[in-house]
Image (cartoon, grey):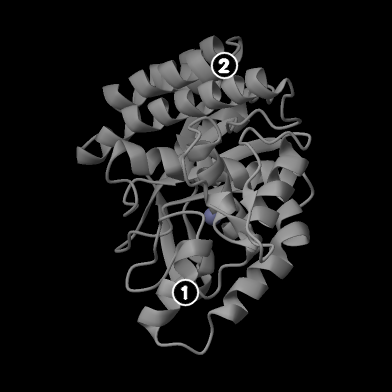
Amino acid sequence: MAPPLAFEEAWDFVYGVPAGAASADRKAVAPEVRAECTISEVPALCILRKHPQGTRTLTFAEEVWRKHHVAVGQLPPEWMDGGYRGKIELKPQFAEASDARQLPWILAAMDAQRTFRDAVTAKLGVAPRPFSGLPSHLRFFVSVGRTTPAAMAIVLASTDQFYWNLHGSLHRDAKSVTETVIHEAFHLEDDHHGGWSLRALTATHAKILAQCSGKSATARDACLAPFAPGRTRVRGGTFYAFHGGNDAREYGAELAVRFFEEALAAPPSPWKCATAENSYAWGAFVTEFWSGKDPLPACLTSSSGVPAP
Ligand SMILES: [Zn+2]
């Protein structure tokens, strides 16, 4: 858990004030807010209470702090280089209108992540370290005229931050929001493991892409399907893990979503058993994050040496 923000930091966090902003760009802090919130152990929450950004945001922020010690604020405005998505304008915003339906889904997803990691820990007798599984800070934003990126995750000065797009096209129901939370949490965890996915999965990711290259879009998609850890797709494109411009970090994040789905479910046809590449990636994942203890039984191996479902 990250230490509570100092008051001035918390003020900027809640209002989405850019780092290094001139004092003229800052809202004036009312003396009573400064007096009361400075002594609070959770300045960001205190500031939200004093200057409510709407009851839904405040209720959510209270709950998510009480249950998971996640502080709620806004992303400063910025023009983001979205790679294959082009330049995207991001603006701070809290959820109060129709997008507020995402708030209980986010909370439920965090509950699910916590419960899942506790249950896998109990089953395997090992706990993943050093990452807790959840961010310390959640910053809301919207993308102007766009529905991507749905979310981002970044380790920043020893804090674990989620940036959440209230206009994100993926946030259409509770299940999708849970997948996004698990996906983004993996990026934080990956960072805490020194960028494991690029080290461990780049060769496998490249091999899969090479195997399916030179085909029509439909044939390529069908070729990639057994290797895809997640169902998320780029609109008009293929599986997110294999979309052009996405590297092994996204493959790893989708693998984390698959682990979340299957580790305790004991599926009859586990993803890891579908191809040799899947088997390798799954094994590397449990080795890195769960001390090599696989919650699923070994795959039956066919005579060809490829793990059989
Ligand atoms: Zn990602």
Q: Residues within 10 Å of mark 1 (few under 14, many from 20)?
A: some
Residue 125: image location, x then y, percent: 73, 20
Q: Residues within 10 Å of mark 2 (few under 14, many from 20)?
A: some
Give the residue type that dot 1 points to.
Cys
Q: Which residue is painted at 40% across and 81% down in the image?
A: 219
187 displayed left or right of 129: left
List the single residue furthest toward the left. Answer: 98
Q: Which mark is residue 42?
A: 2
Q: Tell me the element at label 2.
A: loop
203 displayed left or right of 154: right
Above or below 228: residue 125? above
Residue 308: image location, x then y, percent: 58, 55
Identify the residue under disc 1. 223
24 or 46: nearer the eye? 46
Give the residue type that dot 2 points to.
Val
Q: Which residue is painted at 36% across and 44% down in the image?
A: 176
Q: Tell me the element at label 1.
A: helix
185 or 156: nearer the eye? 185
Above or below 44: residue 252? below
The N terminus, quarter of image: top right
Residue 202: image location, x then y, percent: 71, 66
Q: Which residue is painted at 62% across and 47% down in the image?
A: 299
